[in-house]
Image: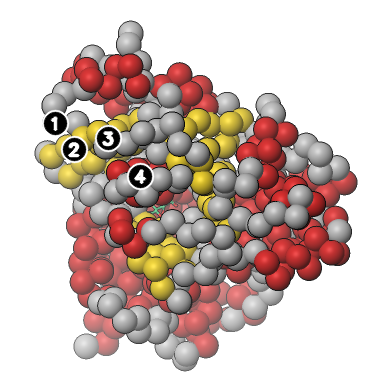
């Protein structure tokens, strides 16, 4: 078995694109969370930036917990392939922008040193929604989270993302150096603001002067990131090896589409990302909201209702009876809550999303998207429902059915009693409140709605919404998710 690496690059087929640039140059970026999404998205943009001759922007990656990614990438000199797939077409692009991957759990001090390195002007993050240690409903740092509390008590060997950011910034501050920009690339609304709030809340517990310095000196731009990156399978890696003769354990597969909208607010050197297709703007919030509510909102509805109905992949679920009506209605509901954005055409965006979801060459698992729902649905659905209700638009029928789908998902059992794993930090809590309902379906809905960390205090107090939710939930339980979606009719078209 020969691994993809610097020494074996020349064995790749002639159609593989490899950008030629000197990789022995300083890392200007530290990235926290070097998973598949980062590799197919930000790392690919930095690869092009380096190929454009903008030096000093190599990335030092870090995994906070698992050594898996470092084991995949370090023996390959940080190199990996991005397979870009659509229909029967596949492009191979080798990305060289990641110099190495650190494992923070094994050597937290090495990551703090990397953050303290004055060459580093930018710290980017894809640590998933839960990695910010925020209360999903309020967005406040969970100071009572055991990992956060442990980092605050002893910051010499942090474990959490806010802990590392504060430890890195503290090292800069003590050295009298310049701070780095902190750029969140996770699917959270106003992700820059949220990261800033989390870092400041954390720093205040450590040292008020440090917190003041961070508040004044550090930029936390928001960003909207978009590229569908399904988890790589062993089969993908084996097929690549059969086709090329090289084994790439860090391979990622994705779609041709990619988008990155970044708030132009940096406190240190800014990489000229506009040269490689990144949109730099003063206002990212509207872009983030549109993407979260339209793309991710639809994704999660497909994941729970499609997953319950036994659909393995997104492209299969959306082809099943009723899903097109449901998703279109969900998009109508989301769109009604968005303000216009210059250069953004919702109708064209929706049509393009339909095509992206139908890309069967990706093999995007519904169960992958279903992960961590408690952390995702507030920004993907619940804020939309709130806005829809506040604007007096009636009941958002599709979003309400999606919530009913998520509630069923939490039971761990789908149509025909087929069981699945509920992969969510609140899985135990949701299982407990379901159990407490003693089999009474209405009580199950009320108990889940009572979880303020997800639903806030307001949604359970909205009787028309709750009534519809109970009705949908019972329909799914008494029939099936598949037949409930198949019978879905858009209330707007019913009125015509
Ligand atoms: C997905 C996202 O897994 C999920 O929750 O909705 O990862 C989605 O594929 C990306 O946000 C697309 O940009």
Q: Is tag 1's residue or tag 2's residue first in the polypeptide sequence? A: 1
Q: Is tag 3's residue or tag 1's residue first in the polypeptide sequence? A: 1
Q: Which residue is mark 1?
A: 15
Which circle marks residue 50 in the picture?
4
What residue is shown at x 41% (from left), y 73% (from top)? Answer: 281
Q: Residues within 10 Å of mark 4 (few under 14, many from 20)?
A: many
Distance between the alpha carbons at the discs numbered 3 and 1: 15 Å
Q: State the quadrant of the C terminus.
A: bottom left
Answer above or below: position of 85 versus 180: above
Mark 1–mark 2 contact, CB under 8 Å?
A: yes
Front position in the image: 117 or 135: 117
Which circle marks residue 91 in the picture?
2
What residue is shown at x 23% (from left), y 20% (from top)? Answer: 10
Q: Which residue is mark 3?
A: 20
The spot of residue 295 in percent (x, y) is 36, 62
Front position in the image: 193 or 94: 94
């Amino acid at each position: 078995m020969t691994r993809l690496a610097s020494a074996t690059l020349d064995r790749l087929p002639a159609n593989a694109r490899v950008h030629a640039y000197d990789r022995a140059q300083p890392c200007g970026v530290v990235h926290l969370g070097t998973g598949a999404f980062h590799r197919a998205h930000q790392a690919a943009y930095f690869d092009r930036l380096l190929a454009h001759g903008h030096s000093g922007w190599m990335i030092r990656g870090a995994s906070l917990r698992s050594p898996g990614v470092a084991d995949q990438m370090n023996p390959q000199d940080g190199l990996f392939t991005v397979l870009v797939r659509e229909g029967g077409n596949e492009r191979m692009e080798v990305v060289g922008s990641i110099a190495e991957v650190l494992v923070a759990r094994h050597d937290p001090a090495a990551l703090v040193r990397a953050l303290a390195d004055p060459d580093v002007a930018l710290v980017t993050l894809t640590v998933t929604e839960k990695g910010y240690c925020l209360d999903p409903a309020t967005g406040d740092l969970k100071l009572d989270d055991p990992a956060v509390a442990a980092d605050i008590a002893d910051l010499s060997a942090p474990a959490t993302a806010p802990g590392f950011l504060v430890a890195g910034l503290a090292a800069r501050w003590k050295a009298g150096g310049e701070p780095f920009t902190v750029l969140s690339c996770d699917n959270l609304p106003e992700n820059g603001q949220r990261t800033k709030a989390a870092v400041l809340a954390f720093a205040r517990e450590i040292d008020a002067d440090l917190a003041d310095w961070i508040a004044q000196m550090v930029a936390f731009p928001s960003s909207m990131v978009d590229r569908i990156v399904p988890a790589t399978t062993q089969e993908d890696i084996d097929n690549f090896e059969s086709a090329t003769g090289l084994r790439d354990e860090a391979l990622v597969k994705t779609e041709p589409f990619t988008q990155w909208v970044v708030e132009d607010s940096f406190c240190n050197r800014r990489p000229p990302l506009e040269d490689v297709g990144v949109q730099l703007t003063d206002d990212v919030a509207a872009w983030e909201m549109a993407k979260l509510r339209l793309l991710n909102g639809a994704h999660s509805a497909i994941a729970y209702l499609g997953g319950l109905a036994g659909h393995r992949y997104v492209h299969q679920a959306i082809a099943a009876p009723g899903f097109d009506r449901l998703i279109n209605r969900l998009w109508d509901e989301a769109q009604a809550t968005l303000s216009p954005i210059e250069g953004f055409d919702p109708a064209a965006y929706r049509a393009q999303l339909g095509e992206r979801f139908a890309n069967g060459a990706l093999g995007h698992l519904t169960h992958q998207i279903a992960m961590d729902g408690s952390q995702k649905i507030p920004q993907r659905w619940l804020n939309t429902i709130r806005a829809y209700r506040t604007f007096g638009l009636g009941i958002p029928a599709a979003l309400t059915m999606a919530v009913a789908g998520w509630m069923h998902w939490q039971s761990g059992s789908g149509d025909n009693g087929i069981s699945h794993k509920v992969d969510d930090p609140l899985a135990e809590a949701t299982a407990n409140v379901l159990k407490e309902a003693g089999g009474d379906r209405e009580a199950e809905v009320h108990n889940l709605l009572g979880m303020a960390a997800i639903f806030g205090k307001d949604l359970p107090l909205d009787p028309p919404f709750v009534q519809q939710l109970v009705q949908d939930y019972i329909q799914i339980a008494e029939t099936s998710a598949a037949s409930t979606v198949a019978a879905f009719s858009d209330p707007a078209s019913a009125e015509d």
